[in-house]
Amino acid sequence: MEYRNLGKSGLKVSEIALGGWVTFGHSVNDDQMVRDIVLKAYEHGVNFFDQADVYARGKSEELMGAVLRELPRHTLVISSKVYWPMSDDVNDRGLSRKHILESIDKSLQRLGTDYLDIYFAHRYDDNVPMEEIVMAFDHVVRSGKAMYWGTSEWPAARIAQAVEFAKANGLYGPVTEQPQYSMLYRDRVEKEILPYTEKAGVGLVVWSPLAMGMLTGKYDDGMPEGARLSDNENWAKQFVNETNRQKVRALKPIADDLGLTRAQLALAWALRQPGVSSVITGATKVQQIEDTAKAAGAKLTPEITARIDEILKGE
Amino acid sequence: MEYRNLGKSGLKVSEIALGGWVTFGHSVNDDQMVRDIVLKAYEHGVNFFDQADVYARGKSEELMGAVLRELPRHTLVISSKVYWPMSDDVNDRGLSRKHILESIDKSLQRLGTDYLDIYFAHRYDDNVPMEEIVMAFDHVVRSGKAMYWGTSEWPAARIAQAVEFAKANGLYGPVTEQPQYSMLYRDRVEKEILPYTEKAGVGLVVWSPLAMGMLTGKYDDGMPEGARLSDNENWAKQFVNETNRQKVRALKPIADDLGLTRAQLALAWALRQPGVSSVITGATKVQQIEDTAKAAGAKLTPEITARIDEILKGE
Amino acid sequence: MEYRNLGKSGLKVSEIALGGWVTFGHSVNDDQMVRDIVLKAYEHGVNFFDQADVYARGKSEELMGAVLRELPRHTLVISSKVYWPMSDDVNDRGLSRKHILESIDKSLQRLGTDYLDIYFAHRYDDNVPMEEIVMAFDHVVRSGKAMYWGTSEWPAARIAQAVEFAKANGLYGPVTEQPQYSMLYRDRVEKEILPYTEKAGVGLVVWSPLAMGMLTGKYDDGMPEGARLSDNENWAKQFVNETNRQKVRALKPIADDLGLTRAQLALAWALRQPGVSSVITGATKVQQIEDTAKAAGAKLTPEITARIDEILKGE
Amino acid sequence: MEYRNLGKSGLKVSEIALGGWVTFGHSVNDDQMVRDIVLKAYEHGVNFFDQADVYARGKSEELMGAVLRELPRHTLVISSKVYWPMSDDVNDRGLSRKHILESIDKSLQRLGTDYLDIYFAHRYDDNVPMEEIVMAFDHVVRSGKAMYWGTSEWPAARIAQAVEFAKANGLYGPVTEQPQYSMLYRDRVEKEILPYTEKAGVGLVVWSPLAMGMLTGKYDDGMPEGARLSDNENWAKQFVNETNRQKVRALKPIADDLGLTRAQLALAWALRQPGVSSVITGATKVQQIEDTAKAAGAKLTPEITARIDEILKGE
């Protein structure tokens, strides 16, 4: 495994992170299976485990936490997130100080740890003043409940505002942003986010780098028909169309040439950006995490990325 | 129930709040009756429960706290206040750092909670430097004992000074002011307070929106004579005169047209101000809180408010 | 003449100031008459001469400036103001940076001086951010075009905001406020303004301390009838009613006992407030300024002010 | 003409501005024709005149300045810009302190005025630290050479950074952004810029609101063939294609229903955004500016904008 600094921070994260989104508490509900996947990831050098309170409504934190608490705490980078509703209550959502401070205690309890390494604002909340948001996350860090904090799917302008407000007031500012980014969803990150974050030292931690599995090639022949779709597959539908299938099929020879699977190629492609610190993958089988872990360290030459660009822009 | 942001903060408060002033610990002294009223309010969507150390000298906090501690904490917005003497001791009053920090611990204990959502300075204290006051409330917030803080019956200039001093020094400033405001007591709020607070994002939480019951119509025929007056009625005396009785009677047809009681009309009238976040009502009977809860969400047209203005200004 | 510091600033202003409002450029349009009045005031120790661009649309500044420029500049405290429209142009009004910076140059030219001692914001402008207003007046001071700046008829909350914002940012803040204040118009100043300004060191410079002449007794028998009213008299009408006439007549024996005219009593009464630095009077005749200048230094005992309070509150 | 505040600043700008880009010094090179156009705009209430050093390499500033200097300065809002190379010199470009401070003096001289109302950074310059850029523009404002400053075509994150850095350091920050925005070029403004600028009080001044004339309908039948294209037409080519022609033709009935030309409709459409303060139009004939001036104040109902949205999204 290779490790990168999380942005300009001193924290080292594995290039490949294991996330609990749409897997743990969904199709992967068995304690033992979660244990096998987490430990296999750890064995391959994955140190970054990404959670959110809302993943399976707390169940994902609990399942993953049960395994992580047996590992040496200092070898782990554990993150969680706050924003999405956890109940119907009006204050049980968003980025008010009340909700942030109440939520981290609950995540810590579910995960069975005294502190997170990174606490993410899961979205931007236009309904709360920037000062309140930044001061609440600063409070989380000062109280020792998180080492760092970050943002997820925030507009670049809001990240900049948070960074500058924190700097101006001697507060802990965000050190990472977690956006969606993949070969099939690249524009927003490349045009709006990276041009700001890279220079500002805010490291990207990418979610859905495989476009919900589309980039693995598993939908080369379309979605499974007639069957009940898993959560993963429901998310994947947005990417499954003929245009994308052609692109993904065209990537195969490139991956083959490099001795990589298309999944590994897609992860290496996201990681070619120096502004990306880690890519988050999920796994429903032990084999998957073994395979993806191998993408760490794979370097793509300018010629390869040019060939890929050509394929991706093709209509 | 409808909810509003408390000023520009991210905290959502119910338009109708239940307060413990001059009811709990006074005429309502029975545990079960308090329980019935609080739970009925909660059932109707009231999430904001307003207290002060001085209400019945701590008894009101205790009675209400005994019920609130059985409800999920994150669904509640609990406030208390500090300023008025709790004993003859020279330091047991006012807004010195010593009194503020000592008092919140006592309020938390009486209420049986780890933190308040809002801690109010119950009056302005000209005897303490603004820096000391703001820094003490900032300390309360930083120590996690309150999520937010506010002021009550402060002159607008002092609120502005606190807001600006806090902003300039990276401290937590007040996000709410609690003034008296009703159809029969409107000038100070409309002329001095709202013109500053509304733009500054300091949300008003109004006390005595029913002018101590006068606006319900229950004194249409004057105060009860000969009888011993309740605490409520003693406060009400200031509003009971022939001029006001005529006004209140004149409001009846308007309320009737809207299918509201005069109490509901009076609450909706206070809530017509976007700068008002919530109105605090007391209740001595379960039925009262049920009735007032229904005022939430009632919208008054410009025509209606113009008719009311006409009645209120009438000599 | 007695002199006071302008609030906590180091500037000394005469207790009696001469203003150009509704006199110069109106009923007093003769160069020689202006000269006689200004020089007589100066001779009696008046050093504070108050102007505004809008007084007679610049004419008042020109008339007074023509006399003042012959006197030693350092012996004078010259003020002017900006806010009211000087033409129909959309930017020729209010407190935008553009209008403030453009207007002071014009006032300096009309007055024939290189700098003002005090530049007043003639009203608060809710249409311009406080930062823009304070930074523009700070710019005026930094550029040497005014020694100090102040406000006129601002709500206390806005004065506080300006003072605190300036302090927090190392900018020149307002050192004076110019409100209307007299025996017949006292509530706003005493209830809202002074409680803030006095402690904050913002000195009040009072306009209309004679309630547009009403307090001199000249309307004891009502307004002149049938005749065309002067500008002064048009303003005076708001104060001329039977209730006020009775009060003003009742003040005569008190003034007589003290060997003062009622005008002198009214000025001394305003100056009894330590938070008031100066009272501005106009004059249409030389004799007037001679008479009013003598009010400086007159002290009212607590007994006298109590008797006056009694008269003023009488319905 | 209607006027709006430039963002939250106190400066009032006409909804329709006259710009010198690709007209003055290009097809409009005649002193008299420029005079006629500028004076006609002024007569119709246009007070905002937009320039840049690079427009016709200074010629546009000179031509427009010759007319503007005859009008009362305080009735005008004059802007210019700096960034693009004015020669081959390595320092004669970009946003270095040197280039900014040297360039404004040249623009002032060409325009024949002592100060600009707004000085724009014509693009973001990634080669200069944000501190240097903001401090240089702050210097321009402090030296009295511009009343306000703004940005043009900056990423939202950079605007946010400039705003926050300025606020944190007591510097003058940007109050306006000048982006390209029209019915045929809307995404960047609506998705990235406005969501930040509107709440931050940074007012948009829109360039090319007519998509280089495409939206007037003049290319309904395609570009003129065989002829030598004007500068305007060369720019226009990017918008002239069959898809756009169909959209523009489909707008005609809507404009007709409202009694507007399509040009007027396009301007009113951009001005429907409260976050847009002004739209900049060019004119090569007196008649054009007369026509476009009439778009000011035209209000589009939600039904109309919905119909327009339908047309614009159509493939």
Image: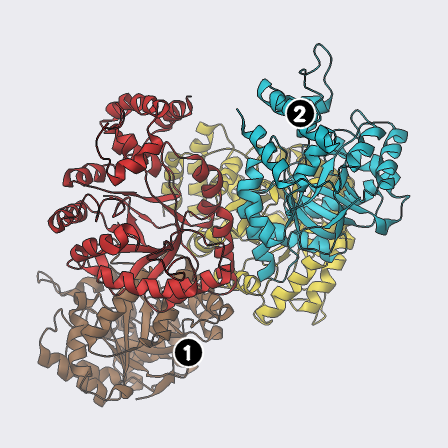
Chain colours: A brown, B red, C cyan, D yellow
Looking at the picture, how far across and down is residue B247, in whole percent? Answer: 34, 23
Q: Label 2 is found on which chain of the structure?
A: C
Q: Few, some or many C-alpha atoms within 10 Å of disc 2 (few <14, some 14-19, many ≥20)? A: some
- Indicate the chain on which mark 1 is placed: A
The residue shown at (78%, 26%) is C26
Seen from the viewer's position, the closer of residues D268 and D176 is D176
Q: Which residue is mark 2?
A: C235
Q: Position of residue A169 (x, y in %)?
A: 49, 68
Q: Position of residue C44 (x, y in %)?
A: 85, 40
Q: Is residue A76 above or below residue C65?
A: below
Name the amino acid, label 2: Trp
Numbered badge on residue A7: 1
Q: Respond whether the residues carrying marks 2 and 1 are from the same subunit.
A: no
* SS state under label 2: helix
Comparing marks 2 and 1, which lies closer to the viewer? 2
Q: CA distance from mark 2 to mark 1?
A: 68 Å
Instruction: Please name whichever residue, A211 or A124, is drawn nearer the observer in this view of the structure.
Output: A124
Measured along the vertical axis of the image, is residue D25 above or below residue A62?
Answer: above
**Residue A88 visible in the current orientation:** no
The foreground one among A263 and A201 is A201
